[in-house]
């Protein structure tokens, strides 16, 4: 989760406003923060397919695991960009991966086509002729029709742990988008708010 909190920036932007104009600051800031969070959300949704080789679009906001935002309010000048995906923190920080729902992690070898080196890839290959599973891994028989003439190659190993390197860059991607866009969003929001100031 990334909190977008720019109170110090807002003070600098608005120190020359009069008292009537300053009354609009909390509302304008909250709206600008929410807009900024939406931009960061979109930046993450565009970034994720470049990093993760998956079939399901888990990052879409309508998904339980999607990239979501919590809007800012005028009495709470913080907008949040977050995901409830169970694997997100591990992919962001790195560490030891363990089975989530299955009995073992299924890790592809160099023999597995790139299109099957993703979630669900092992299950798809098990539907292929001559591919079978054991407690140690998933294999494929190659060669003639008779077993005695066939060889067996390892496609996936089954492990209880695996080392994951940081690669998500959630915080970095969201923060870059926020820093780039907030100033413009704030002044746009402030101008709209000042038009209605009394």
Image (spheres, rainbow, N blue to C red):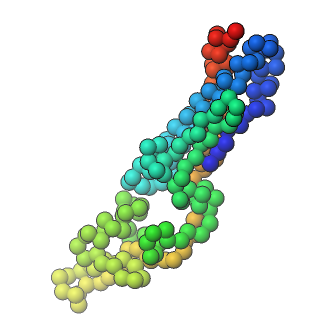
Which percent across, then down, holds residue 26?
70, 25
Is the residue 164 above or below the residue 153 in the image? Answer: above
155 and 2: which is toward the camera = 2
- Picture quadrant of residue 174: top right
**Relative height, residue 33 to residue 103 (above, below):** above
Which sits in the foreground, 39 or 110?
Answer: 39
Residue shown at 76% from the left, 18% from the top: 22
Task: Out of 26 and 5, give the one closest to the viewer.
Answer: 26
Q: Is residue 145 left or right of residue 89?
A: left
Residue displayed at 52% across by 55% down: 85
Q: In which quarter of the image is the C terminus?
A: top right
> Can the viewer see residue 92?
yes
Location of residue 181 with respect to 18 vertically, above or below = below
Q: Can residue 184 be seen in this view?
A: no
Q: Position of residue 21 (x, y in %)?
A: 74, 14
Please state if 148 lies on the left or on the right of 13 as rendered: left
- Residue 94: image x %, image y %? 62, 62
- Residue at the far bottom: name it: 148
Residue 108, picture quadrant: bottom left
């Amino acid at each position: 989760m990334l909190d977008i909190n720019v109170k110090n920036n807002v003070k600098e932007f608005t120190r020359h406003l009069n008292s009537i104009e300053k009354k609009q600051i909390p509302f304008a800031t909250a709206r600008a923060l929410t807009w900024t969070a939406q931009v960061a959300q979109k930046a993450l949704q565009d970034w994720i397919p470049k990093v993760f080789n998956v079939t399901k679009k888990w990052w879409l906001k309508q998904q339980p695991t999607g990239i979501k935002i919590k809007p800012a309010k005028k009495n709470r000048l913080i907008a949040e960009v977050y995901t409830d995906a169970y694997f997100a923190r591990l992919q962001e920080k790195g560490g030891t991966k363990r089975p989530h729902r299955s009995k073992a992690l299924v890790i592809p070898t160099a023999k597995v086509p790139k299109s099957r080196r993703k979630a669900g890839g092992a299950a798809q290959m098990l539907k292929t002729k001559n591919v079978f599973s054991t407690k140690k891994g998933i294999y494929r028989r190659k060669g003639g029709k008779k077993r005695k003439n066939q060889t067996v190659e390892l496609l996936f190993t089954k492990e209880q742990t695996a080392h994951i390197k940081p690669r998500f860059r959630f915080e970095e991607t969201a923060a870059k988008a926020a820093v780039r866009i907030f100033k413009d969003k704030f002044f746009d929001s402030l101008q709209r708010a000042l038009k209605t100031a009394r």
